[in-house]
Image: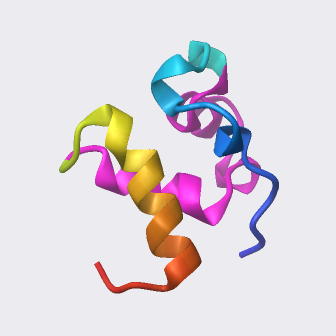
Amino acid sequence: MHDPPSLFTERPVFQLPEHETPAHRLAEHSADYLSDSELLSLLLKGALPKSEAMDTAQRLWITGSAV
C-alpha cells in the first residue's frame, strides 16, 4: 500500500477536527485515504491513550520496529 501524505505531521490527532481524524476518513471514504501509519494508529488506539496512538504508529512505521 502507498503512504499518502498524512494530516498528522503538524498537529496531534486530538487537536484535529472530527472530519479529519483517521477513523472518520476511513468511515466516510476508504482505507485508500489513509496513510499506512494512520491505519496502524486505528489498531493501536484501543490499547493506547488517544493522544499517543498516532505518534506511536508513526514512530513504528518510520523505524520499522516490531509491535
Most foreground residue, 38 or 56? 56
Query: In this rendering, would 22 be left or right of 47?
Result: right
Q: Where is residue 46 in the image (x, y as percent from the top left)?
A: 22, 45
The answer to whether residue 66 is magenta is no
Name the residue at 39% across, 58% down.
56
Name the residue at 40% across, 84% down.
65
Q: In this view, does 7 lie above or below 16?
A: below
Name the residue at 71% across, 75% down.
1
Q: Where is residue 61 in the image (x, y as percent from the top left)?
A: 53, 73
The answer to whether residue 21 is magenta is yes
Q: Where is residue 39 in the image (x, y as percent from the top left)?
A: 52, 56
Most foreground residue, 30 or 16? 16
Q: Where is residue 35 in the image (x, y as percent from the top left)?
A: 68, 58
Q: In which quarter of the image is the C terminus?
A: bottom left
> In which image quadrant can residue 60 be found?
bottom left
The extreme top residue here reads: 17
Q: Is residue 61 above or below residue 35?
A: below
